[in-house]
Image (cartoon, rainbow, N blue to C red):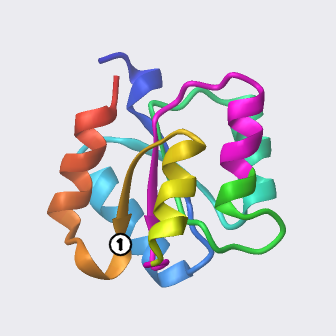
């Protein structure tokens, strides 16, 4: 795995959740960039290559759905793992339709599981 593909983008507007996610991923040797909203995420994606994007759905400025729509429109193939508290089946279906590779609930996953899911999809 090359260094550029060990780089992960975490897109999360909840600072405490982001800190925990980033800490767990860095402990495993990943390089991690952070965005607090969808607009910031899209700017970072234009400038960097990521192996995985860990994406929340409900955020200010641009939602996770907006981000996935834009990436799909521009042919971006980076694996997206949606990490959200939205529990409606329609949210999961829409995220998967827009290209998410996996969808899991923040309150139902532990950090070891999160790291394993990232490892599964990183190139």
Residue at image point 20% right, 71% down: 110
* Residue 51 in picture, x, y percent from top left: 45, 30
Q: Is residue 10 visible?
A: no
Count numbered badges in the picture.
1
* Residue 63 in picture, x, y percent from top left: 72, 64
Would you call the spot at circle 1 few (<14 residues within 10 Å), some (14-19), or many (20 or more)? few
Please, is residue 40 above or below residue 58 in the view? above
Residue at image point 29% right, 18% down: 1
Please, is residue 50 above or below residue 9 in the view? above
Q: Is residue 5 left or right of residue 49?
A: left
* Residue 123 in picture, x, y percent from top left: 34, 22
Q: Is residue 120 left or right of residue 48?
A: left
Q: Is residue 64 left or right of residue 61?
A: left
Residue at image point 72% right, 44% down: 69
Instruction: State the residue in front, 8 or 98.
Output: 98
**Is 84 colored magenta in this rendering?**
yes
**Is 76 colored magenta in this rendering?**
yes
Numbered disc 1: secondary structure: strand
Residue at image point 59% right, 26% down: 49
Say which quarter of the image contains residue 20: bottom left
The part of the chain drawn in magenta is: 67-87
Pointer 1 residue: 105
Q: Is residue 21 left or right of residue 88?
A: left
* Residue 83 in picture, x, y percent from top left: 43, 64
Instruction: State the residue in front, 71 or 5.
Output: 71
Instruction: State the residue in front, 74 or 20.
Output: 74
Q: Is residue 113 visible?
A: yes
């Amino acid at each position: 795995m090359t260094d550029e593909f060990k780089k992960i983008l975490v897109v999360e507007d909840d600072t405490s959740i982001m800190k925990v996610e980033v800490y767990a991923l860095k402990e495993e040797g990943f390089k991690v960039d952070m965005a607090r909203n969808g607009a910031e995420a899209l700017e970072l994606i234009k400038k960097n290559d990521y192996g995985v994007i860990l994406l929340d759905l409900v955020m200010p400025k641009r939602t996770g759905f907006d981000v996935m729509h834009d990436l799909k429109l521009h042919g971006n193939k980076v694996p997206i793992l949606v990490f959200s508290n939205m529990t409606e089946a329609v949210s999961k279906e829409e995220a998967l339709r827009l290209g998410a590779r996996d969808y899991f609930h923040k309150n139902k996953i532990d950090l070891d599981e999160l790291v394993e899911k990232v490892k599964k999809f990183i190139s």
